[in-house]
Image (tube, rainbow, N blue to C red):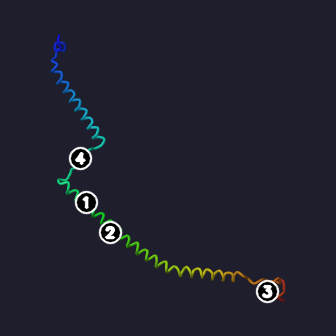
């Protein structure tokens, strides 16, 4: 008996059918993989402008403008900081004599306070100092 007679089919017919099954299984697998990938992470390629060089030139011009703008901002901040430093220097020169005056005033207050705090010694006789007890007069 030949192989043809045992299976009842032509072996040549079996090969194309198995290739068709393999291709359909592979197609199903890729469709499922694409569906899972599309659900998890949307994937799309960005559209390139017609001439990619034009996009690069535009990007470089934008970067150039941004850098120039940032440098101008830094120059403006530097000028503001210099002006603020000058103002602080003037304020410091104004404060120096005020600090000295305040210190002098504090020393004067302390010396005056010492004089005010010193009270004359009270006599033992009495508050009136006339020699009578209790300060009574006759």
Q: CA distance from mark 1 to mark 4?
A: 22 Å
Image mark for residue 45? 4
Image mark for residue 60? 1
**Which residue in the structure is indicated by mark 3?**
128
Instruction: Tell me where residue 7 appears, x and y as whole percent.
Output: 19, 15
Q: Quadrant of residue 122?
A: bottom right
Q: Are marks 1 and 2 in contact (CB under 8 Å)?
A: no
Q: Are marks 4 and 3 in contact (CB under 8 Å)?
A: no
Instruction: Tell me where residue 19 appears, x and y as whole percent.
Output: 19, 26
Does 17 sit above or below residue 27? Answer: above
* Dot placed on the residue nearer the N-terminal end, 1 or 3: 1
**Which residue in the structure is indicated by mark 2?**
72
* Dot placed on the residue nearer the N-terminal end, 3 or 2: 2
- Which mark lies nearer to you, 4 or 3? 4
- Which mark lies nearer to you, 1 or 4? 1
* Dot placed on the residue nearer the N-terminal end, 2 or 4: 4
Q: Secondary structure at mark 4?
A: loop
- Along the viewing direction, whichever of 48 and 115 lies nearer the viewer: 48
Q: Residues within 10 Å of mark 1 (few under 14, many from 20)?
A: few
Q: Residues within 10 Å of mark 3 (few under 14, many from 20)?
A: some
Q: CA distance from mark 3 to mark 2?
A: 84 Å
Instruction: Tell me where residue 61 appears, x and y as whole percent.
Output: 24, 62
């Amino acid at each position: 008996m030949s192989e043809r007679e045992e299976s009842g089919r032509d072996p040549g017919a079996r090969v194309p059918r198995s290739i068709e099954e393999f291709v359909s299984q592979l197609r199903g697998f890729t469709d499922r993989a694409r569906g899972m990938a599309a659900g998890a992470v949307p994937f799309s390629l960005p559209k390139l402008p017609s001439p990619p060089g034009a996009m690069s030139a535009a990007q470089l011009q934008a970067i150039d403008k941004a850098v120039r703008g940032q440098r101008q901002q830094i120059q403006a901040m530097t000028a503001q900081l210099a002006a603020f430093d000058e103002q602080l220097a003037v304020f410091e020169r104004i404060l120096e004599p005020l600090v000295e005056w305040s210190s002098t005033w504090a020393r004067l207050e302390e010396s005056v306070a010492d004089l005010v705090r010193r009270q004359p010694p009270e006599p033992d006789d009495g508050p009136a100092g006339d020699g009578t007890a209790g300060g009574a007069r006759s």
